[in-house]
Image (spheres, grey):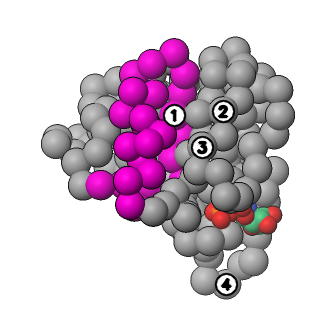
Amino acid sequence: MARSLQPALQISTSSPEQTRHLGRRLARLLAPGDLICLRGDLGAGKTTLVQGIAEGLDTDQPATSPSFTLLHQHPGRIPLHHLDLYRLAAADLADIGVEDLIGGEGVVVVEWAERLPPGFGGDRLEIALAFDPGREEVRHLRLSAVGPRWERLLRRLREENHAHPRD
Ligand SMILES: Nc1ncnc2c1ncn2[C@@H]1O[C@H](COP(=O)(O)OP(=O)(O)O)[C@@H](O)[C@H]1O
Ligand SMILES: [Mg+2]
């Protein structure tokens, strides 16, 4: 799989609201069939980011944190399939039919994407979220593109950030 041609886009947020705002910005770029893979420790802000994405897609309910359900589906402007693999057990992925959701009518966002089988998924946006070592409400997000569509969108985000760093 070809990796990102451009360096990762680094964005830091200093509150949950800023992370949700980034999610709403991302939602504006999304189209049916898109895949976003999120990595990062417990509490890094994955679900918070998904909340922003859900808002930006005008879904009916806010995204929620892990439960015993791996897949949460939200009807919206574009349907959101929110997958949380924290409690993934063998064979669950096949049961859910995730491969069929990707490239379908909705957008698929995966928390704990590091638990996906190697080689899973094609074009996608990957986002790694990390705590700041010193500042409690600061998170560092690294966005990288796999495939031409996300290469283009990442370039656009980078340009927007350059023009309006706080937007
Ligand atoms: N900049 C930030 N971005 C996102 N969450 C933050 C931030 N600062 C503090 N938080 C807090 O960190 C926690 C993140 O939780 P959550 O989004 O559920 O993480 P994850 O899904 O990665 O386990 C929340 O309690 C949130 O309020
Ligand atoms: Mg979560």
Magenta segment:
90-117
Point out residue 97 in the picture as x, y percentages from the top left corner: 42, 35
Considering depth in this image, is 89 or 102 the residue closer to the camera? 89
Circle 4/circle 1 CB separation < 8 Å: no
Q: Is residue 6 left or right of residue 20?
A: left
Please tell me which residue is depicted at 28% across the width and 26% down the height of the picture.
148
Residue at which label 1 appears: 108
Residue at which label 2 appears: 73
Please tell me which residue is depicted at 58% across the width and 50% down the height of the picture.
70
Circle 2/circle 3 CB separation < 8 Å: yes
Q: Is residue 95 magenta?
A: yes
Point out residue 65 in the picture as x, y percentages from the top left corner: 73, 56
Q: Is residue 100 visible?
A: yes
Of circles 3 and 4, the one toward us is 3
Residue at which label 3 appears: 71
> Dot 4: within a 10 Å radius of its alpha carbon, few (fewer than 14), some, or many (20 or more) residues?
few
Disc 3, ligand 2: is the CB inside 8 Å?
no
Q: Is residue 9 visible?
A: no
Residue at which label 4 appears: 134
Of circles 2 and 1, the one toward us is 2
Quarter of image, res 41? bottom right
Disc 2, ligand 2: is the CB inside 8 Å?
no
Residue type marked 2: Gln
> Dot 2: within a 10 Å radius of its alpha carbon, few (fewer than 14), some, or many (20 or more) residues?
some
Q: Is residue 17 magenta?
A: no
